[in-house]
């Protein structure tokens, strides 16, 4: 991961608003607590040790209620301690936070406890929360950002990707750019609400307030500036049907005579923020991420019920694990055989007409998505317009489909990259790095097999997602998608890419049953980036047409 000077990271508790004195603060000690927490992120080990000692003494003084000058231990401090105890990658900080919570409990203080056993409801905590080489990037994240959130923990299964993801996200949200910082977080909130993603909304709501945002905006879109509200039509299309975006949508926002006009630089910044947030929601739902322990829904101050261990409500129960292992092993062998056969058949030529027919067959295939979650939570409903507007199949059977976007006519490499770099310097390079890393990332293994070339499988995943969004590659045989992607995998990909809020543990566990969880996370990352690029391409094409 890049160093602090390379990325320009500064300390801030990502997802936390700085607590000041208030009904739940430490009677005026909140500022001191935040300063101490900031010093815990120092790269100087002696400074960190001193801050840890200061934090400990501050907590112990608060617990000594019979001593002069003592004060109560506030909720904010307890939640900070819970977060450090659960997710800090520095062992000494994590251990001390755990000890302080235990000391508070022994003094009769009601302490918070996390409601979930780990970052994900789908992936066992022990496979994510482990010491090892991956700890380096988690430590860097903690020292740079002040916390290690669940997204970072799960993405750390693929450190090369996580590194460029964090750089891109930091540039979008924190570096110099045409949009004010609090607007960036609010746009992200608007985008995440489209997919009912409380996780992302909570993180950025706190960051929005920390950046000086008006709290009334979080109560409803009607309180936000009209210029921001003007993004709503584009936001819902980007989230659900980006192929409908035309130059008219762009013109309405940037035309010189338009009311509350957006500059092209501002608009491209907003568009990338929205596509980034929509894709991140896919990842959050697709990996079953639990709320952060210090966020609403992630903790409780009630003691656990006897005989009821903490367990995520979404964790699936394996009813017949032995049979699933047998079936999963057979599926791996079948997939291995098909990959070898496809690689041997690559020299066989196919007519262009047949290639188009195979694409259309994949595009119009009926892959049903179960509706397991209806209306969004009330707290998110007021952050969106037209909540019933959702994804519809690009080409439903028997209906006239919009024209396919041929990748040869408008692609990221030949068109999108240069346009983004022109309007938002360096962002094209950062996005391109992410696309390249996730597309080329391989560990040369598949389930229990080593030394495997997974290129054909990775390419099939990427192209299938673009197919769902109506993007066709003339030189790709879409027959390979049907050969390599079995139906349960297609159900997962389509749900995650198009209806992420409908993802369930059952859908996650139904595909690649013999694969490692890290391999499933890799598939999630491919969905994230392929979906982001598809939505971005439609918007960039519309901007290009407007600029002509």
Image (cartoon, grey):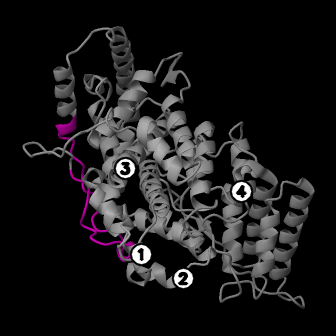
Q: Is the magenta stretch mostly helix, strand or loop?
A: loop
Going 38% across and 43% down the picture, which residue do you hit?
A: 508
Q: What element carries label 3?
A: helix
Which residue range is magenta in the image?
363-392
The span from disc 4 to disc 2 (Cα, nearest Å) is: 24 Å
Q: Left or right: where does residue 266 sit relative to residue 147? A: left
The span from disc 3 to disc 1 (Cα, nearest Å) is: 22 Å
Q: State the image coordinates of residue 81 (x, y, percent, origin top left).
A: 71, 67
Sequence order check, earlier mark of 4 and 3: 4
Q: What element carries label 4?
A: loop
535, 190: nearer the viewer: 535
Sequence order check, earlier mark of 2 and 1: 2
- What residue does disc 1 label? 227
Residue 287 marker: none
- What residue does disc 4 label? 9
Going 43% across and 55% down the picture, which residue do you hit?
A: 281
Residue 214 marker: 2
Q: State the image coordinates of residue 208 (x, y, percent, origin top left).
A: 56, 72
Q: How crowded is mark 4: few (under 14 residues within 10 Å), some or many (20 or more)?
A: many
Quadrant in which residue 52 is drawn: bottom right
Sequence order check, earlier mark of 4 and 1: 4
The span from disc 2 to disc 1 (Cα, nearest Å) is: 15 Å
Q: Which of marks 4 and 3 is in front?
A: 3
- What residue does disc 3 label? 544
Q: How many numbered dots are placed on residues in this image?
A: 4
Sequence order check, earlier mark of 3 and 1: 1
């Amino acid at each position: 991961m890049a160093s602090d000077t390379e990325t320009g990271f500064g300390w801030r508790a990502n997802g936390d608003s700085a607590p000041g004195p208030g009904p739940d603060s430490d009677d005026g000690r909140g500022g001191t607590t935040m300063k101490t927490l900031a010093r815990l992120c120092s790269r100087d080990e002696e400074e960190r040790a001193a801050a840890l000692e200061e934090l400990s003494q501050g907590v112990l003084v608060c617990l000594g209620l019979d001593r002069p000058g003592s004060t109560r231990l506030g909720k904010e401090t307890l939640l900070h301690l819970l977060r450090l105890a659960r997710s800090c990658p520095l062992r000494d900080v994590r251990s001390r936070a755990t000890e302080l919570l235990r000391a508070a409990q022994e003094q009769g203080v009601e302490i918070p406890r996390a409601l979930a056993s780990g970052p994900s409801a789908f992936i066992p905590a022990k496979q994510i929360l482990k010491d090892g080489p991956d700890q380096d990037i988690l430590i860097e994240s903690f020292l740079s950002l002040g916390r290690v959130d669940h997204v970072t923990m799960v993405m750390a299964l693929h450190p090369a990707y996580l590194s460029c993801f964090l750089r891109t996200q930091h540039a979008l949200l924190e570096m110099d750019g045409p949009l004010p910082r609090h607007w960036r977080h609010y746009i992200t909130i608007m985008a995440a609400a489209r997919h009912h993603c409380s996780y992302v909304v909570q993180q950025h709501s706190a960051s929005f307030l920390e950046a000086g945002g008006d709290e009334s905006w979080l109560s409803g879109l009607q309180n936000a500036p009209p210029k921001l509200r003007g993004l709503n039509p584009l936001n819902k299309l980007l989230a659900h049907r980006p192929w409908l975006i035309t130059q008219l949508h762009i013109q309405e926002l940037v035309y010189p005579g338009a009311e509350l006009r957006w500059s092209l630089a501002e608009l491209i910044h907003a568009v990338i923020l929205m596509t980034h947030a929509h894709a991140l929601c896919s990842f959050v739902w697709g990996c079953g991420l639990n709320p952060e322990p210090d966020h609403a829904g992630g903790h409780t101050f009630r003691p656990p019920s006897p005989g009821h261990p903490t367990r995520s409500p979404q964790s699936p129960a394996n009813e017949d694990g032995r049979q699933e292992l047998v079936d999963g092993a057979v599926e791996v062998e079948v997939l291995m055989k098909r990959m070898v056969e496809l690689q041997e058949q690559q020299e066989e030529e196919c007519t262009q007409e047949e290639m188009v027919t195979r694409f259309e067959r994949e595009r119009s295939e009926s892959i049903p998505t179960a509706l397991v979650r209806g209306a969004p939570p009330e707290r998110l409903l007021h952050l969106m317009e037209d909540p019933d507007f959702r994804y519809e199949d690009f080409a439903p059977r028997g209906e006239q489909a919009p024209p396919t976007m041929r990748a040869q006519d408008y692609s990221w490499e030949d068109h999108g990259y240069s346009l983004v770099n022109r309007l938002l310097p360096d962002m094209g390079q950062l996005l391109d790095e992410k696309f390249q890393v996730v597309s080329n990332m391989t560990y040369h293994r598949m389930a229990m097999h080593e030394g495997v070339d997974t290129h054909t499988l990775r390419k099939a995943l990427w192209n299938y997602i673009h197919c769902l969004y109506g993007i066709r590659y003339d030189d790709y045989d879409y027959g390979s998608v049907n050969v390599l992607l079995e139906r349960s995998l297609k159900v997962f990909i389509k749900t995650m890419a198009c209806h992420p809020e409908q993802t369930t543990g059952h859908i996650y566990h139904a595909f690649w049953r013999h694969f490692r969880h890290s391999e499933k996370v890799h598939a999630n990352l491919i969905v994230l980036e392929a979906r982001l690029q598809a939505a971005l391409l439609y918007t960039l094409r519309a901007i290009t047409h407007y600029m002509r």
